[in-house]
Image (cartoon, grey):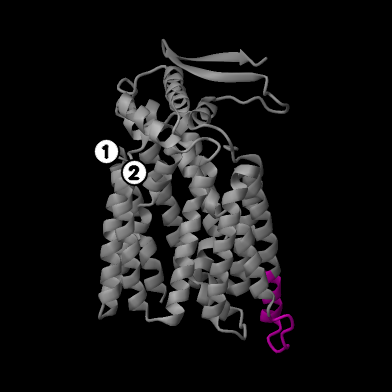
Amino acid sequence: MTVLTSLGAITNPIGSVLSGVLAEYLGRRRSIQISSIPFIIGWIVIGMANSVNWLYVGRLVSGIAAGMSTACFTYVGEISTAESRGFLQALGPVCASFGILLTYTLGYYIRWSTVALISIVFGIFSMVSIQFLPESPGYLLKNNKIPESFEVYLWFRRNNALAQQEMDRYHENQKKNNANKEKRSFKETYLSPQTTRPFCILVILFLLQEFSGIYTLLFYAVNFFEETDLNMNEYVSSIFVGIIRFTMSIVAAFLINRFGRKILCTLSSLGMAITMLTVAIYVMYYERNPDEQKILSYLPLVGVIFNVMFSMIGMLPIPWVMVGELFPLEVRPIMSGVVICMAQTFIFICVKIYNDMLVHLKFSGTLLVFVVASILAIIFCKFVLPETKNKSLEEIEQNFRKTKDLKGFDNGGFDIESEGSKDGEDVFTVKVNS
């Protein structure tokens, strides 16, 4: 079971990098379309498998497809307005939660191989439906297809003035870059503050996300409830958790643009820490007093349910949302692929070491690790994570281009912007906001 569970996570990083490369050179839309191919092949292999080895192959192939979600976040980020981007990006976790719930439910009623074959339909639907959408305007702009990008903005905005506003914002941002991309070296492109700063932020955010137990609970839902010794069907418990996850993902989609990314991630981490600590204390007590009859036997289930609820309003969906927001256009597909590759690697590590943690730390100790990660996430989200609510992608890039921030007081009256290099020296402009 452990091997089969973790195999899908092994190839996720491959899919993430592959998706970034395809999105960079073939376009976001084509990359999304190509990602349906390993999905279809993987589910066919799993559905037709007559030995465990074929199940392994199917999991490896479908894992590549799952990792190729990178282009989806890039595409949605580039076609959205600043006001709608959070909501539209959050629909990705909503769909993922629905797929998990559907799989749990179908798996309870029908044979797993039939569930796999049913899943092929979703891969075919994705491949066909994306053909009716236009290419991302970001990809077209990067390839100097200005008239085509305007037409795409007009297709999405349905308003000439709004489409022209998007074009003007892009050209203004290009002027502030103060360099043509052909003249920019690798160091200037990939090691600039507007690339390295979001990279570090996202990697740390994903590291805290995975070690807070979000995906471990997802992969080992059935095993998790077995560890708590609940007197109820573990598969029914998993379906119930799936319902909660799906419902809260919808709630999060509406909350994300109302309250912003920063506050939701902070509150989410706080809720996860409190609920998981409650379950950990309960489990630890009965580990040390195994002969006592348990009271409040449903407390672990309630704690897990609230943990899932809190994770869904912030720490689970928002890191994926921010992948499509933080990077500048010229490095967005590649760097998004690299970050998601690392995130998928963290997921694989957490899934793989879960059983070893149970052996060495016991169940209560494993839960305490999740608590510590959640507490660290509170601190990180409160003091480091940037707020991108209602900010255009160009505004986010300009914010990261600043190399110095005034500390200790509100410096909203000043903007410090890099003007590039002159005679080997960095040149900055300080503007006073009226």
Q: Which quadrant is home to the N terminus? A: bottom left
Q: Residue at x 58, y 24 (%)?
A: 404
Q: What element carries label 2?
A: loop
Is residue 213 visible in the rendered image? The answer is no
Q: Give the range drawn in magenta.
A: 279-297
The quarter holding residue 28 reads top left
Is residue 218 visible in the rendered image? The answer is yes
Question: Pointer 1 and pointer 2: residues touching (CB < 8 Å)?
Answer: no
Residue that carries the numbered disc 2 in the rendered image: 133
Residue 286 covered by magenta stretch: yes
Where 249 falls versus 413 (above or below)? below
Q: Position of residue 108 (x, y in %)?
A: 46, 80
Q: Residue at x 53, y 74 (%)?
A: 239
Where 229 falls versus 170 (above or below)? below
Residue that carries the numbered disc 1 in the rendered image: 25
Residue 226 covered by magenta stretch: no
Left or right: 120 with respect to 248? left
Q: Where is residue 56 in the image (x, y as percent from the top left)?
A: 30, 71
Disc 2 marks a residue whose amino acid type is Leu
Q: In front here: 75 or 202?
A: 75
